[in-house]
Amino acid sequence: MIEEKNFREYFDENGCFCRESRLYFGQCTGNNKMSLQEILLFTSDTAVEDYYLRGLSWGFLYERGFVIMLARLSLAIERLPSANEEILLRTWEEAPQGLQLTRSYHMTTAEGKTLLRGHSTWLVVNPETRRIIKPDQFTIRPVPTYSEPFPGIPCGKITPPDNATLVDERRIGWSEMDGNRHMNNSRYGAYASDCLPEKWREETPKNIRFNFSKEAVLGEKVQLYCSEIEEKKQVIITIKQDNVTCFEAEFSY
């Protein structure tokens, strides 16, 4: 007889939103580990669910002139979960930094062993004008105060070297759009993974950083570049549209 499993969503004693799940076969890459696209999708969707359960749905925010867009993300990885493994993701907002909101993540096994930690920054933007709204004008929820130390690399600016190699060009399709009318951030993870040199594809990076700089929208062509810095065991993937940078990812092994 098959034992049923109920995966919970709940807030813990610190107000952190917790989401239990099982990692499925289709969420993994060829080495049976959680794909980068799914990490970005799972973390972002969990942040959205956190807001939703607090009465701050995407529609509620949009009607009031707010959309929230991922700006930067840094991940410190212990190991990546495999297919059929049960995982728990905790997420919480921390105090804003400058013009950006901040949010942290802690993914563990069902037994509580750390898989990865993340720290991210987000911009509040007017959906019509695309102008940035300062955090002190985003007053529809209490200013967060909880925090935990982040062991990874800070969410700083990524600076790729000048010797980047063009490896691909793609046109943004309808299936890659989200409700903010731009390519969903998880798709950048898929593009970046496809550009990794073969020797790094099945290796798990210790740290990954992402910079989201410019929205890529339906029908645009984007160019994908790769830079390998062998002495640092780093790979930097850059996505551009007409020579303007849309996205950068830094993989450190």
Image (spheres, rainbow, N blue to C red):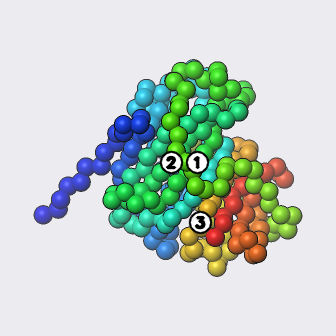
Q: Amino acid at mark 1?
A: His
Query: Is 225 on the left-hand or right-hand side of 70?
Result: right
| Residue plotted at (39% across, 66% down) | 83
- Mark 3: few/some/many CA within 10 Å (<14, 14-19, 20+): some
Q: Amino acid at mark 2?
A: Tyr
Decide which of tag 1 and tag 3 comes sooner along the chain. 1
**The one of 29 and 77 positioned closer to us in this rendering:** 77
Residue 45 % position (x, y) = 48, 44
Residue at label 3?
Answer: 206
Q: Residue furthest left?
A: 1
How crowded pointer 2 is (Cα within 10 Å; few <14, some 14-19, many 20+) is rated as many
Q: Quadrant of the C terminus?
A: bottom right
- Residue 100 location, quadrant: top right
Secondary structure type for disc 2:
strand
Q: Is residue 237 visible?
A: yes
At x 67% / y 35%, what residue is drawn? Answer: 97
Is label 1 in contact with label 2 (beta carbons under 8 Å)? yes
Numbered mark located on residue 119 in the image: 1
Q: Tag on residue 170?
A: none
**Which of the marked residues, 1 or 2, is nearer the chain's N terminus?**
2
